[in-house]
Image (tube, helix red, strand yellow):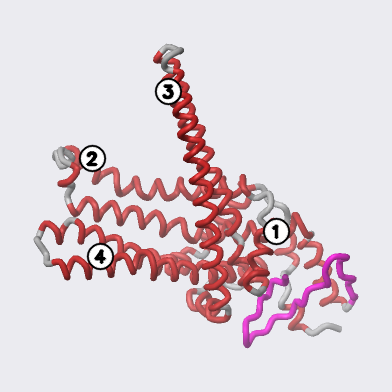
Amino acid sequence: MPSSGRSSGLPGLHQLADLEPLSTGDLIDRAVHIYRHNFAPLLALATIPVVTSCTGTLLIAYTFTGLRESAATLPVMILGMTLGYSLTYLISPLLLMLITGGLTRTVADFVMLDVPIGFWRTWRMVGGRLWPLILTQLIGYILFGMVISGLFFVGMIIAWTAIAMSFLLFGYLPSVLAGGLFTLLLFVLTALGFVGYCAAVAQVALIPSVVMIEGRATWDSIIRALQLARGTIWRVVQITLFDLAIASAAISAIGIPFLVYVILNGHFEDLTRTPTWFILAFNVADQLGKLLTLPMATIAYCLLYFDMRVRQEGYDVELLGARLESTAGVPVRPTANRPAPPLTTSPQTETAAVPS
């Protein structure tokens, strides 16, 4: 008979019942449910990279405005810019990579094993897969940048060609009709650009899940993530739109009152003289939007990872068979394409409880 430790390292029947193909609406609904029930630790973790980035952007903004207005010396401005850019574009992205990976694993354990999401437990998970996590996500960012650059180059060619053709229409069509067609063209190009961006995100969004849950090597994790990402573009579009809605609401709640105040007091007569405090407030509002959406996006992509495994591999059937084997001692035949995964959990090393 299997040991009780093997059985305890498997999802219960309740979790297995929830492990089913999900629509994007159901996936977002479950992500909101997890976020709401683990708000404190998730917010604490998201605060680290967001506050770091916020500090850097505020320092950059203040260097451009406040220090310039106070006639600060050149070394002081160089120091402020260097520190600001380092916090914003080096330290904050690194912290974001680590926390995203750790959260992916703790969210997976919460979904599959009802293990609470904890601040320090997330960091222990990061420590267990530190270098593979960093290396894999760095490669993912590079690939993402290459794809975005290629899409941008192709998009610019298409955009300029389409705009040139639309301007030719002004000579043959009434101005109102030509203007409407030009507006529609800009909308279509913007929508295509957004879908292209989401298509690039879809290729790398599941990399942290593969690294932290399946424990694969670097290139194997990337290839595996690309395989699971097939057919997820429109789902990533919907998740991204949902995140943008949350971020926009947070930014508007803070930014609009400040914007109205600045306009009513005539501070926008010269954009070069926009008050320093307004620039700083806008940066804070922008970072607040990121603070709210970071945990939500991480949870949503973790759930998407499980959903794609259920759809492509019958993952729920595998886990149910493994649980039957662990509780009744009935050997379960592996699938034709891959052997039955090991399902034990090591409390000492906190090996992935969710099998690959």
Task: Give the numbered dot on residue 81.
Answer: 4
Query: Mark 3 or mark 4, which has the lower sequence index?
Result: 4
The image shows residue 64, relative to residue 192, as above or below, that is below
Q: Is mark 1 on a helix, strand or loop?
A: helix
- Name the mark on residue 227: 1
Looking at marks 3 and 2 on the same chain, the residue that comes earlier in the sequence is marked by 3
Residue 303 magenta-drawn?
no
| Residue at 30% over, 60% down | 57
- Which badge, 3 or 1, is on the more N-terminal residue? 3
Looking at the rendering, the stretch of residues picked out in magenta corresponds to 330-356
- Residue situated in front as seen by the camera: 85 or 47: 85
In 3D space, how far apart are the residues under numbered discs 4 and 2 (Cα atoms)? 30 Å
Could you tell me residue 353's position as x and y percent? 68, 75
Q: Rounded to the nearest whole Å, what is the CA distance between mark 2 and mark 1?
A: 48 Å
Q: Looking at the image, which residue sits at the far bottom?
A: 348
Q: Circle 2 — which element?
A: helix
Residue 333: give x, y in percent of width and height. 90, 71
Q: Mark 3 points at which residue?
A: 167
- On the picture, is 266 further left or further right than 233? left
Do labels 3 and 1 touch, CB within 8 Å?
A: no
Circle 1 Cα neighbour tier, 10 Å, few/some/many (<14 / 14–19 / ≥20)? some
Label 3 vs label 1, nearer the camera? 3
At label 1, which amino acid type do we have? Gln
Q: How far apart are marks 3 and 4 (CA)?
A: 42 Å
Amino acid type assigned to the residue bearing label 4 in the image: Met
Horizontal arrangement in the rendering, residue 290 relative to residue 100 (left or right):
left
Q: In this view, does 91 lie to the left or right of 349?
A: left
Where is residue 51 drawn, in percent x and y?
35, 66
Question: Which residue in the protein does label 2 denote?
Answer: 260
